Image (cartoon, rainbow, N blue to C red):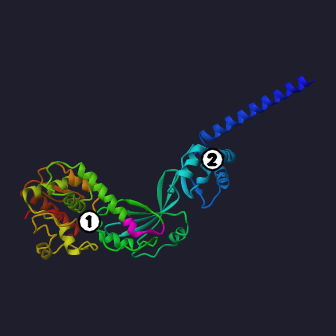
Amino acid sequence: MWRAIASNALTFFIVVLVVISGLLAWGRAEYSGPGPLVDAACVKVDRGASLSSVSRVLETSGVISDARVFRIGADYSGAGAGLKFGSYLVPAGASMVDVLGIITEGGQSTCGREVNFRIGVNSADVILRELDAATGRYLEVVKFDPAVDVAPQTYLDAVADADLRYRVTLAEGVTSWQVVDVLRRADFMDGEIAAVPAEGSLAPDSYEVTRGGDRAALIGAMEERQVRVLAEEWAERAPDLPYASPEEALIMASIVEKETGIAEERRQVASVFVNRLRKGMRLQTDPTVIYGVTNGEGVLGRGLRQSELRRETPYNTYVIPALPPTPIANPGRLSIEAALNPDDTPFIFFVADGTGGHAFAVTLEDHNANVVKWRAIEAQQGQNAVTGVQGN
C-alpha cells in the first residue's frame, strides 16, 4: 500500500514539475518573443504610475499579451522600479523585454506631442506637432508667430500637459542678437541671458529642452556645439587655405551661409571668395555690408543704398580688402565645411540667376553678361538688389 502511495506521489510530483517547466517555458517565450502589436503605437507612462497599473494598460492596449508575465519578468530583472514617465514609441512586434527597456531606459519621451520653437532668419514660429506612430512622422497641429499672433487655444490646452516635450530649433544664418531676442519670448523657458553671444558662436541645430529650462544654459549648449563643429571641420580642412585661424574660417562660413541657401552651391560660393582672397581682391559681398548697417539686429528689409555701398565700415567688403572682423551670422556645419573644403574652381564672380541659385564666371566680361541677364529678371520681379560678387 505504502509503495503504491509513494508511486502515486512521485508521479504527481513529476507531473507538477512538468507543468511548472511548461509554464516557465511558456512565460519565457511570452516575455522574450515577438509581441502582439501589429502597428507601432504610443505608450504613455503617467507620473508616479506603478508597475502593476502600467502592466494592465499595456495589456489592455494590445502592446503585451499578458500583464502578469510582464510584471514578473520586470520584477525578476530588477528593472520594474525604473519606470520613467512620458510617452514612448513602441515598434510593431516589440517583445516584453523591448517594451520594458523602452519605458525604463528611454530617457526623453519619443512619442506624443511636442512644441518646436523655431528661430528663423525672418521670423520665429511656435509649432505644436504630434508624432504619427504609424508613419514615424510629425504632423503639424497648430503654428503661430509669438511676436505677432495670440497663442491659439489648442496650444494653450496642450501646454497644460506635463508630458509635452519642447525643443528649440535654430536655423542657419540667424544672428546671435536674433537668437537672444527670440529666446526671451520663449514662455516655456526661464532665466536671463546676460549678454549677446559672439557672432557665429552658436551652432544651428535642434535642441531638446525641458519646460522651465534655463535660457543661458541653452545658449551655452549652442556655443559648446559650435566649438566642437568648428574643431572637427578645421581638422579636416583642405591644405593652403588663406585663413590664419579657425575664427577666420568661421567668418568665411558665415558669408557663404548668407550668400546661398542651396546646399549644392556652398562649395562653389566658397571657392569664389577663397580665390579672391588669394588674389588680394576685395570680397564685394552685400551680406557683409548689410551686417555693417544692421549690426545683426534684425532684417534690413530693403535694398542697399549706394551711400551704404560706398561708406567705409569694418564690414563693407566693397571697401576693405580683407575679411570682415567677425562673422556676420551663425553658420551651420555645411557652410563651415564648404569654407574649409571649397571646390577647386577658377571662378571669381557670381550673381543670382533667377532660379534661387547663381551663375558663376571667371572673366569680368562673362560676369557682366550674367548681370545683364539677372537685371532683366530683376526688372520683371520688381527687385533692386544684385546678389553675388560684383566686378568693380
- On the question of residue 287 being in view, the answer is yes
Residue 376, percent from left and from top: 16, 64
Q: Amino acid at mark 2?
A: Ala
Whether residues under marks 2 and 1 lie with C-beta atoms below 8 angstroms apart, the answer is no
Asked if residue 34 lies in the magenta stretch, the reply is no
Q: Is residue 171 left or right of residue 303?
A: right
Q: Is residue 9 left or right of residue 30?
A: right
Asked if residue 213 lies in the magenta stretch, the reply is yes
**Toward which corner of the image does residue 8 lie, by quadrant?**
top right
- On the question of residue 264 being in view, the answer is no
> Which mark is on residue 208?
none
Residue 347, percent from left and from top: 12, 53
Looking at the image, tell me whether mark 2 or mark 1 is earlier in sequence order.
2
**Toward which corner of the image does residue 348 lie, by quadrant?**
bottom left
Residue at figure coordinates x 9%, y 60% from the top left: 368
Local SS, label 2: helix
Quarter of the image with the C terminus in it: bottom left
Give the magenta part as a residue range.
211-219
Quarter of the image with the N terminus in it: top right
Residue 76, percent from left and from top: 64, 44
Up/down of 282 relative to 81, above or below:
below
Q: Which residue does the numbered mark 1 point to in the structure image?
A: 329
Q: Amino acid at mark 1?
A: Ala
> Which mark is on residue 74?
2
What is the distance, in whole Å, between disc 2 and disc 1 at their CAs?
51 Å
Up/down of 382 relative to 224, above or below:
below
Local SS, label 1: loop
Count of marks, rendered view: 2
Q: Is residue 370 left or right of residue 337?
A: left
Farthest-out residue, front: 2
Q: Name the one closer to the observer, 336 or 62.
A: 336
